[in-house]
Image (cartoon, rainbow, N blue to C red):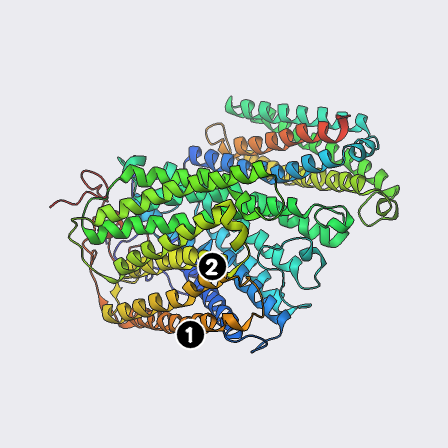
């Protein structure tokens, strides 16, 4: 029975390919948010006063805390990659747990932030929102849409990291076979990066 | 690690049963599953098109009511664009042949590949659901222009979600191909020794990757606007419909290169295979694919010359559109130059390639009429645009796809079709095609608008010619498909290389074994198209 295995078989393990695939996927994520950034800039320039007025409703302190949380979580996941590369599985796991804790803290903050606004009737479909001038409506719609899509990415990222943690635990992801952990780190940095733009756009620009 | 799998059995024989297809990781089977799904939708789209043409055979009401007509042309557009022509060549022949032509055994991410197919099916289900629930399929045109798309009661939300899911399928296929091309080429195959079909898929994949997310997010905004009435795109509540048009065409113009580039890749394979001559200007053809992909990203504004843009913007978009014609023309000249002094073997696939060049030329040049600002003001939104678009997409990409089907048929199924019948099918298709679409251009110049249900009596004659053309085309299509279906069962068995091509996919058995090659593929000496005489 004849058989043949090619040297360039697609079934070989190829960490380079995995990383390249991840980077390409991150490009698509950037462009997904890119469309929203275009909409934001167009409507900001058309309704600059309304956007300014609406942005005062947002709590800069919670936003700042969340920014610090996310940047720190980016650091912890980067550190866990280094830890695992150096063979310290225990430390790597601690750092990944820390990353998960930060992700959860971010979402809890977001929950309260949104909750207060929704209580005040500021959400598409609610009474207060429906009586706002159109520029402020757009601001809050974009606020919910963009931070909501971002929060969704935090959740997906958290699940991704959770899966990787299980594999680290089982010894399927190790210092030598680290590309899955690296990819979850890349994804997490992207989530972080997008927030770095969302934060000034909604909270800081005056 | 790769394990040794028998090369005695071909990829059809190695496993049987429906589950072995639906959950296969084999790129060839996934390619064929795309083929059956895409061809089915193509036929649905064709039937809708025939109905439209039948309605337009005479002024006034002929067979359907105006609302139904609007729904028919929208569904025709959505099916033909999102379910047929965008996936067509990359998903079918790209999946099947890209790994073989690179000399490898699969794509870089086989499981992702299967996921793409399932996403395609999911998107298709959403598109079909619009037929059976609520007020029926959308009646907005495939462009979903606001504000009508946020006001109509028909199933816009479902249609838009279908397009959204199909977009994901397209992105993942593109991602897979880029990594495959970078990582899995045969030893010694540099980028500049890669088959031109692979080059064209490479360019296409970048567009799929970088343009599709924009439409994804835009379509979600349409849904949000419909649900919450925020004032994103509906001017009556403070939105900007022109912004929607920009966002839509930022994707949808590059998308026409997703449709056209793989077709050009096919032609670049067919011409040297049947001219038995080294391709003229390999690098020019390869790099012009990349140039088209790059420049094609910046020309979207030419869809909006009459929508209200500044004069400066219009001039810039017009110039950029003219520039994108240059790399396209480079390819056409190179193909024709390849034929010169070749030992041409006139077979069905080559006939399709020649028809492609002829029809794509008409389509491309009429595109320049639309790119010129002054001319566009007159023909914008007339039947001229419909004629132009179908010459490029059907006369171009569609014919290239049929050519590819006739070229690779013996490789995929290991049998040859009846060449005489295939040529008759080809002749009817070509004649029917030109009778169907050329009158549209004349009608457009005479002033008949596109998407209209009714027209003035003086347009009747040309509309009758066009409708009769659609019948001839349909007969050609039936003959072509019938011939191929018959050949699949009873065609004469062929060897590895019935066309005498030097391209790598002809080195393996027909049909190929599961891991594609039964002996180590060899690079052709002197480049992928170097025919020795």
Q: Which mark is residue A31?
A: none
Q: Is residue B4 visible?
A: no
Q: Nearer the viewer, mark 1 or mark 2?
A: 1
Q: Seen in the image, is B484 located left or right of residue B394?
A: left
Dividing the picture into quadrants, the one containing residue B34 is bottom left
Q: Which mark is residue B84?
A: 2
Q: Seen in the image, is B106 located left or right of residue B315?
A: left
Chain letter behind tag 1: B
C-beta proximity under 8 Å, tags 1 and 2: no
Q: Which residue is mark 1?
A: B468
Residue at the spot 41% in from the left edge and 41% down from the top edge: B292
Q: Nearer the viewer, residue B152 or B98?
A: B152
Chain letter behind tag 2: B
Dividing the picture into quadrants, the one containing residue B347 is bottom left
- Is there one chain holding both mark 1 and mark 2? yes
| Circle count | 2
A171, above or below B271, in the image: above
Q: Nearer the viewer, residue B407 or A75?
A: B407
Q: Is residue B422 visible?
A: yes
Per the model, the C-alpha gap separating discs 1 and 2 is 24 Å
């Amino acid at each position: 029975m004849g058989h043949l295995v090619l040297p360039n078989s697609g079934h070989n393990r190829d960490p380079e390919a995995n990383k390249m695939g991840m980077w390409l996927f991150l490009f698509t994520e950037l462009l997904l948010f890119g469309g929203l950034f275009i909409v934001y800039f167009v409507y900001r320039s058309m309704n600059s006063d309304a956007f300014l007025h609406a942005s005062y409703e947002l709590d800069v302190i919670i936003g700042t805390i969340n920014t610090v949380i996310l940047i720190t979580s980016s650091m912890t996941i980067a550190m866990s990659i280094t830890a695992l590369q150096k063979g310290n599985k225990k430390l790597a796991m601690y750092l990944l747990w820390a990353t998960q804790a930060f992700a959860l803290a971010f979402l809890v903050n977001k929950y309260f932030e949104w909750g207060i606004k929704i209580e005040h009737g500021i959400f598409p479909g609610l009474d207060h929102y429906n009586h706002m001038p159109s520029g402020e409506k757009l601001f809050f719609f974009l606020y919910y849409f963009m931070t909501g899509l971002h929060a969704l990415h935090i959740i997906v990222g958290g699940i991704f990291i959770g899966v990787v943690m299980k594999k680290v635990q089982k010894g399927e992801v190790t210092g030598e076979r680290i590309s899955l952990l690296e990819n979850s780190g890349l994804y997490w940095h992207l989530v972080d990066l997008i927030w770095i733009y969302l934060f000034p756009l909604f909270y800081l620009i005056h | 690690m790769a394990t040794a799998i028998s090369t005695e059995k071909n990829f059809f024989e190695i496993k049987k049963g429906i589950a072995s297809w639906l959950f296969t990781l084999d790129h060839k089977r996934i390619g064929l599953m795309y083929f059956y799904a895409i061809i089915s939708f193509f036929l649905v789209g064709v039937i809708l098109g025939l109905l439209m043409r039948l309605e337009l055979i005479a002024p006034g009401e002929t067979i359907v009511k105006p609302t139904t007509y609007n729904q028919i042309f929208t569904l025709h557009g959505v099916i033909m664009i999102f379910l047929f022509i965008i996936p067509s060549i990359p998903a079918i022949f790209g999946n099947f042949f890209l790994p073989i032509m690179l000399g490898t055994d699969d794509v870089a991410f086989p499981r992702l590949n299967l996921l793409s197919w399932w996403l395609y099916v999911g998107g298709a289900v959403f598109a079909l659901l619009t037929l059976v629930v609520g007020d029926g399929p959308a009646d907005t045109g495939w462009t979903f222009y606001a504000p009508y798309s946020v006001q109509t009661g028909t199933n816009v939300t479902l249609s838009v979600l279908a397009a959204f899911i199909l977009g994901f399928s397209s992105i993942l296929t593109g991602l897979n191909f880029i990594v495959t091309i970078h990582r899995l080429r045969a030893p010694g195959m540099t980028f500049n020794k890669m088959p031109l079909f692979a080059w064209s898929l490479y360019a296409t994949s970048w567009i799929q990757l970088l343009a599709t997310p924009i439409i994804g997010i835009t379509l979600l905004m349409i849904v949000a606007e419909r649900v919450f009435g925020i004032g994103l795109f509906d001017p009556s509540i403070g939105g900007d419909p022109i912004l929607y048009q920009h966002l839509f065409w930022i994707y949808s113009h590059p998308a026409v290169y997703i449709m056209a580039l793989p077709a050009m890749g096919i032609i670049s394979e067919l011409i040297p295979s049947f001219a038995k001559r080294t391709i003229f200007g390999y690098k020019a053809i390869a790099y012009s694919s990349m140039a088209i992909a790059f420049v094609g990203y910046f020309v979207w504004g030419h869809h909006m010359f009459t929508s209200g843009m500044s004069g400066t913007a219009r001039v810039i978009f017009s110039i950029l559109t003219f520039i994108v014609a240059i790399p396209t023309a480079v390819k056409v000249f190179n193909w024709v130059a390849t034929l010169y002094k070749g030992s041409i073997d006139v077979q069905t696939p080559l006939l399709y390639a020649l028809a492609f060049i002829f029809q794509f030329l008409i389509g491309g040049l009429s595109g320049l009429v639309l790119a010129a600002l002054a001319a566009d003001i007159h023909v914008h939104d007339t039947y001229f645009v419909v004629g132009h678009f179908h010459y490029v997409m059907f006369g171009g990409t569609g014919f290239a796809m049929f050519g590819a089907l006739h070229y690779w048929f013996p490789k995929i199924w290991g049998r040859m079709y009846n060449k005489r019948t295939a040529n008759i099918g080809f002749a009817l298709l070509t004649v029917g095609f030109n009778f169907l679409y050329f009158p549209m251009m004349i009608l457009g110049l005479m002033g008949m608008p596109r998407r209209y249900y009714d027209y003035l009596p003086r347009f009747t004659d040309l509309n009758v010619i066009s409708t009769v053309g659609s019948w001839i085309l349909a007969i050609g299509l039936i003959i072509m498909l019938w011939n191929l279906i018959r050949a699949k069962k009873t065609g004469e068995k062929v060897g590895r290389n019935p066309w005498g091509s030097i391209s790598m996919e002809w080195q393996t058995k027909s049909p190929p074994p599961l891991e594609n090659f039964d002996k180590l593929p060899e690079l052709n000496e002197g480049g992928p198209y170097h025919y020795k005489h």
